[in-house]
Image (tube, grey):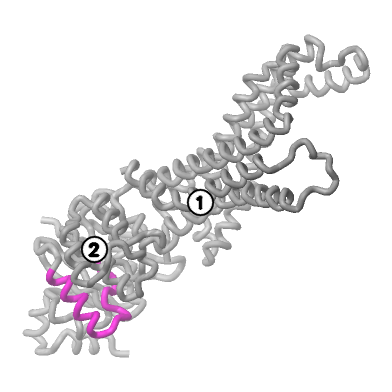
């Protein structure tokens, strides 16, 4: 049943994404072909180049906007609007309905993110900015920083945070009609309440991780080292500093993972509860 | 033996407003039942409760002995009082959706009904008129061999010719071992096809009876009895 629901979701949304992605790919390609990268310092850029660059920026923003808009409208109309009369009477559990929408939203969000990242990467490679960034990261790696694991951790965190964000939006929409007669207004109100709640969750969780003393020790050491070791390679190049940062970054990442996972799990159960027990399509 | 649709002390309140109050009845299999009552009497609420679109405040509703849920949705064919197809769909997508999700769906029957209505499968649903969309929806709902058909106002807001078509479609296509519940306040159009009636008034059951019993006992049509019961 879940696979059938996911198939239905992709069928309903694929056309929109096909056009957005096609537009982004074409504009990126045109931009890469015609932009004269050796004259970046030219104060009077060619009008055509300006237009193409403008279109590129619009396409990148549109890709992100369409993805976010479709995540929201698809759930709202399909689960809480008239289309809900069909969706909620299909022989499927509420969890399957939510999961199908969630998985589809995650897949599209990852695709959009990957496409935008690849597009920017292509520009970066063309201009040499990427090789400069890579060289900086490599020099950190040489000093002893665990740059590789940070990169993986950051990419994972973006993914987990996006998932938590989607579930928070779903929960807001599921709760919204129970707060106000106007479903949109109720959903916005629920979103604000949940966002404040998420902030309240993040403070104690952050404190648990900070309580290890590592983060506080790091800040104190940096402040001390700035004055004490200035001009001698500095704190960031000392063995103690590198060790401390190598310990602190995973902790900071872990605290952010924990916060996102807690928010995601709570929002999942809220969405499930309100769709099962408090559904009112009227 | 349990009925196909059973309500026991079923109540639903929206805030402080009661929509259904202590509703109790049981419907057997193979009947065509009119769920009759004026606007706001609780007909739609009752049908939504049976479809798991609302949760009761008190009491129970059972479909074939089970509370509304995933299992009962396999045996209930529901026609809501509004259009529920997504805008991106063509008629063939809607047929495909029913074929994919409902094991009791007869695609050939749906195809025949749509052909008789001269509706092309590739037509986008959004381009159809309101009346044609309703007919497409009805054709799909009636192409299932369901145990229980719950039809909410299928003839509301359509012209007399369309009413005849809709009632004809229901009578010709329902699973005769199943039960059809038709909610409406347009009694005269529908009474000729009914076996039983349930009169709902302000969320309460006023009467549950076989149509023949009413006619024999009171020597009146259902429409006349309805007008007496719901006299303003």
Relative to B173, is A118 above or below?
above
Which residue position holds label 1? A19
Within the magenta stretch, is there residue B214? no
- Locate the N terminus of chain A by quadrant: top left
- Locate the C terminus of chain A by quadrant: bottom left
Q: Position of residue A168 (x, y in %)?
A: 55, 46
Residue under the point 33% across and 70% down: B81
Q: CA distance from mark 1 to mark 2?
A: 34 Å
Relative to A148, is A9 above or below?
below
Q: Residues within 10 Å of mark 2 (few under 14, many from 20)?
A: many
Q: Position of residue B186 (x, y in %)?
A: 25, 83
Q: Position of residue B116 (x, y in %)?
A: 18, 71
Q: Position of residue B204 (x, y in %)?
A: 29, 73
Provide the chain ID for the residue under circle 2.
B
For residue A243, side relative to residue A263 (left or right):
right
Residue under the point 20% across and 61% down: B6
Q: Secondary structure at mark 2?
A: helix
Provide the chain ID for the residue under circle 1.
A
Relative to A39, is A23 above or below?
below
Within the magenta stretch, is there residue B170? yes
Q: Nearer the viewer, residue B113 or A232?
A: B113
| Range covered by the magenta-colored residues | B150-172
- Could you say which disc has been placed on residue B216 in the image? none
Q: Secondary structure at mark 1?
A: helix
Which residue position holds label 2? B141
Q: Residues within 10 Å of mark 1 (few under 14, many from 20)?
A: few
């Amino acid at each position: 049943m879940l696979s059938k629901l996911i198939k239905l979701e992709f069928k309903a949304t694929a056309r929109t994404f096909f056009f957005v992605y096609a537009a982004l790919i074409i504009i990126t390609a045109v931009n890469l072909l015609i932009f004269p990268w050796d004259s970046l310092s030219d104060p009077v850029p060619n009008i055509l180049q300006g237009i193409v660059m403008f279109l590129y920026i619009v396409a990148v923003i549109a890709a992100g906007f369409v993805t976010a808009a479709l995540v929201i409208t698809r759930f709202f109309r399909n689960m809480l609007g008239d289309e809900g009369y069909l969706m909620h009477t299909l022989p499927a559990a509420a969890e399957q309905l939510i999961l199908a929408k969630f998985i589809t939203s995650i897949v599209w969000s990852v695709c959009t993110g990957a496409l935008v990242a690849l597009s920017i990467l292509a520009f970066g490679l063309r201009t040499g900015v990427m090789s400069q960034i890579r060289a900086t990261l490599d020099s950190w790696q040489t000093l002893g920083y665990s740059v590789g694991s940070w990169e993986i951790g950051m990419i994972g965190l973006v993914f987990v945070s996006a998932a938590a964000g989607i579930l928070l939006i779903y929960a807001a929409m599921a709760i919204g009609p129970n707060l106000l007669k106007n479903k949109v207004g109720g959903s916005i109100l629920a979103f604000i309440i949940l966002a404040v709640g998420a902030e309240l969750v993040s403070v104690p969780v952050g404190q648990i991780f900070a309580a290890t003393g590592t983060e506080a020790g790091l800040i104190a050491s940096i402040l001390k080292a700035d004055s004490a070791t200035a001009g001698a390679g500095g704190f960031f190049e000392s063995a103690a500093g590198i060790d401390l940062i190598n310990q602190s970054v995973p902790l900071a990442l872990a605290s952010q993972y924990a916060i996102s996972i807690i928010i995601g799990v709570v929002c999942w159960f809220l969405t499930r509860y309100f769709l099962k027990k408090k559904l009112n399509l009227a | 033996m349990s009925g196909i649709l059973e309500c026991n002390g079923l109540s639903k309140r929206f805030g402080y407003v009661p929509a259904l109050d202590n509703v109790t009845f049981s419907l057997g299999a193979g009947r065509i039942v009119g769920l009759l009552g004026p606007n706001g009497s609780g007909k739609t609420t009752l049908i939504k409760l049976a479809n798991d679109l609302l949760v009761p405040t008190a009491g129970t509703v059972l479909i074939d002995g089970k509370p509304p849920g995933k299992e009962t949705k396999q045996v209930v064919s529901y026609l809501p009082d509004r259009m529920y197809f997504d805008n991106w769909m063509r008629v063939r997508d809607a047929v495909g959706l029913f074929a994919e999700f409902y094991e009791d769906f007869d695609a050939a029957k749906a195809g025949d009904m749509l052909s008789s209505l001269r509706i092309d499968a590739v037509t986008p649903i959004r381009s159809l008129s309101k009346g044609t969309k309703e007919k497409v929806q009805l054709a799909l709902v009636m192409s299932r061999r369901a145990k229980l058909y719950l039809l909410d106002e299928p003839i509301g807001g359509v012209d007399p010719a369309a009413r005849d078509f809709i009632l004809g479609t229901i009578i010709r296509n329902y699973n005769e071992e199943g039960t059809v519940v038709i909610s409406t306040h347009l009694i005269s159009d529908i009474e000729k096809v009914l076996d039983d009636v349930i009169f709902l008034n302000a969320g309460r059951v006023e009467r549950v009876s076989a149509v023949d019993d009413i006619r024999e006992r009171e020597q009146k049509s259902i429409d006349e009895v309805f007008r007496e019961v719901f006299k303003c």
